[in-house]
Image: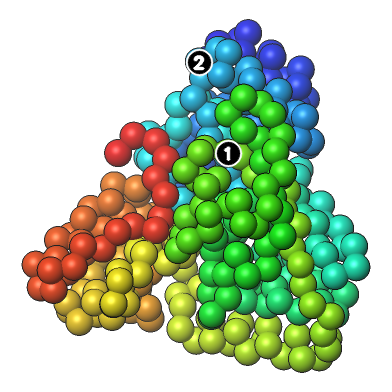
Amino acid sequence: MEQAIYNKLCEIAGTENVLIGEPMKKHTTFRIGGPADYFVLPHTKEELAAVISVCKRENVPWFILGNGSNLLVSDDGVRGAVIQLYKNYNDINIEGNCVRAQAGASNSVVAHRALEASLAGYEFAAGIPGTVGGAVVMNAGAYGGEMKDILLEVTVLDENGEFLVLKNEELELGYRTSIISKKGYVVVEAVFGLAAGNEDKIRGRMEELKNQRVSKQPLEYPSAGSTFKRPEGYFAGKLIMDAGLRGFSAGGAQVSEKHCGFVINKGDATAEDVINLIKEVQRIVYEKFDVHLETEVKFLGKF
């Protein structure tokens, strides 16, 4: 660990917001992952830009983290800096029918703030286990709704350290993709356009979707959410089930018996367990159905 880099990061974010050797399993919903060299929690977009600038200048690899909900971190950890936009960067403001949320705001909190303001449109995302930043980058969706349906504009930090405001039509939002991911931009905040609605109806819809999730998804176990993207013309979970892989396991990692599209941490699973399981599932499904399952989960570190 280079003391000079640590000191520079502390000058920007404060000593209490720069951690050394922080275990990443504490910051992922999979509860898996080795230590990060530097773990930085900026409070403002200016601090964020300054931290990234230091990393670039000092040739330190860096990664933006939300609440770690769609991520598998290597058992060896992460070389470089993990910059978390979550606990210190999650303000939400409502202006008329618009919701302005910082990248680290959780989707569930945004949905509940919208509910309190009797604004409809964010219900589908109430149970998406992640932050606004991550949801926007991948155009997250569920139960017939997608971010592209409600997103008005996004403020991003570009590769030159400049802040840009991109309108919905400039974002190239597709199935689990956007120009943000293609260009390597960092989401700073997003503005959503919602509709005036009835609070009881909005709450009812959120409850209905919550009950569907609880009944169909293995929420009682650590996971990274849906493990595989939906192959065109198929459903990943059904392919895995039809391949006879319900409950299939490798070490502490297991194909959920409740929903075969989820790989869960059954108990002390390692990243290696998860990778081995994913590869076996991909191999068997391809052999049986000639369909390649592409992972939706992102990987961080050496695999």
Give left or right: position of 216 versus 256: right
Is residue 214 placed above or below 167 in the rendered structure?
Answer: below
Q: Residues within 10 Å of mark 2 (few under 14, many from 20)?
A: few
Give left or right: position of 87 versus 241: right
Q: Given this view, does label 2 or label 1 mark the residue nearer the observer? A: 1
Is residue 174 placed above or below 215 in the rendered structure?
Answer: above
Q: Residues within 10 Å of mark 1 (few under 14, many from 20)?
A: some
Which residue is located at x 72 percent, y 44 percent?
165
Which amino acid lies under the numbered mark 1 shown in the image of this protein? Tyr
Question: Where in the figure is residue 171, as x and y percent of width and height?
Answer: 58, 52
Camera-side residue of 1 and 84: 84
Residue lying farthest to the right in this orientation? 96
Residue 145, quarter of the rendered image: bottom right
Q: Which residue is mark 1?
A: 185
Is residue 194 placed above or below 181 in the rendered structure?
Answer: below
Figure label count: 2
Image quarter (top left, top right, bottom left or bottom right) of the C terminus: top left
Q: Which residue is mark 2?
A: 59
Give left or right: position of 296 versus 99: left
Residue 160, quarter of the rendered image: top right
